[in-house]
Amino acid sequence: MRRDIMRRSAVLVLLLAGLILVAQAQELRLPNKEGSLKFAVLGDSGHPGTGQTAVARQMASWRTRFPFEFALMTGDNLYGTESPRDYENKFSIPYKPLIDAGVKFYAALGNHDDDGQTQYKLFNMDGKKYYSFRPQNGVRFFAIDTNYVDAKQLEWLDNELAASGSDWKIVFFHHPLYSSGATHGSADLQRGLLEPVFLKHGVNVAMTGHEHFYERIKPQKGVAYFVIGSSSKLRKGDLRQSALTASGNDSDYAFMLVEIDRDEMYFQAINDKGMTIDTGSIRRIGKAEPTPDGRPSR
Ligand SMILES: [Fe+2]
């Protein structure tokens, strides 16, 4: 009888410990401050199926606790054909709860995406393959088309970054300049073209996709790089052992929540079961202090 009670107590303790662990993994790790900039990031998201459905569901569920206003799409927004029906089946139906709640999606083009996507209202590209927007004072985003980085786009990027002064500068695009993926790896060609421009203007963060996993790269020359390409497709076991990796996950579908509060950017990557797979923060460096006449010093 006594042994029975002891066994039951042990089971109860284990059960409670398990519940606490699950609760911790599903805990919001971002400050969730009033007035901060809140957004989500998803990538390679245009493949209907259980992964996409589960990630979309998690995004909507987390949004009830963390009211993000918009989402960045790192490309491969629609796999396969792109008829009006495909836009529905591969995007507006799976993400309907978010769209209905007023979440704005900002897309970058991936290698599977037709240029026609720039005309799609819900991707907010305004007919352009590369564009920038500033959702809040002090933070500017730049969507880059890494399918074809020509001189014209580089000149645009150079001018746009220069004009953004002391804002946080966050770039997003498809091909990762740094990646530990066995399938693709780092996009050397694009890196050679874009990295000098990023460094010249003090880009802080780059969100990318293409590889179907999650990877946070150790900061490269002061720039924080993320690969978020497992929001509807997953390439299990594709992450190689690499000195580049600060954190990685190639076993779960995933997306990311981000919050910017003054000079700090907080992030939390979450899988399709609502469990946290990575979390941390980035402090903005290279901020241009305003000069006495109110203009940035560089
Ligand atoms: Fe891709």
Image: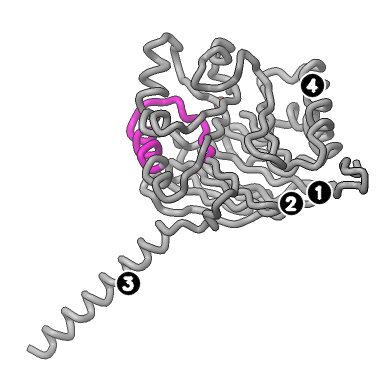
Q: Answer above or below: position of 237 versus 196.
A: below
Q: Amino acid at mark 4?
A: Trp
Q: Residue at x 37, y 66 (%)?
A: 21
Marks 2 and 1: CB-CB under 8 Å?
yes
Labels 3, 1: front one: 1
User: Looking at the image, is mark 3 or mark 4 earlier in the sequence?
Assistant: 3
| Tag 3: amino acid | Ala
Provide the residue span drawn in magenta.
40-58
First of labels 3, 1 by sequence position: 3
CB within 8 Å, label 2 to label 3: no
Q: Mark on residue 98?
A: none
Task: Check whether the beta carbons of the residues at disc 3 and disc 4 lie within 8 A of each other.
Answer: no
Disc 3 element? helix
- Crowding at mark 1 (Cα within 10 Å: few <14, some 14-19, many 20+): some
Calculate the distance from the C-alpha at mark 2 to the C-alpha at mark 3: 37 Å
- State the image coordinates of residue 129 (x, y, percent, origin top left): 65, 17
Can you name the residue that lies furthest to the left here? 1
| Residue with the mark numbered 1 | 287
Q: Earlier in the sequence, mark 2 or mark 3?
A: 3
Above or below, 198 against 247 in this view is above
Q: Which mark is residue 17?
A: 3
Q: Position of residue 181 (x, y in %)?
A: 59, 39
Residue ID for mark 4: 156
N-terminal of the pair, mark 4 or mark 2, is 4
| Residue under pointer 2 | 284
Q: Who is closer to the viewer here, 146 or 291?
A: 291
Which class describes the residues within 10 Å of circle 4: few (<14), some (14-19), or many (20+)? few
Measure how far apart labels 4 and 2 are at the Cα level. 24 Å
Regarding mark 1 in the picture, which secondary structure is present there?
loop
Q: CA distance from mark 3 to mark 1?
A: 44 Å
Whether residue 210 is visible here, answered yes or no, is: no
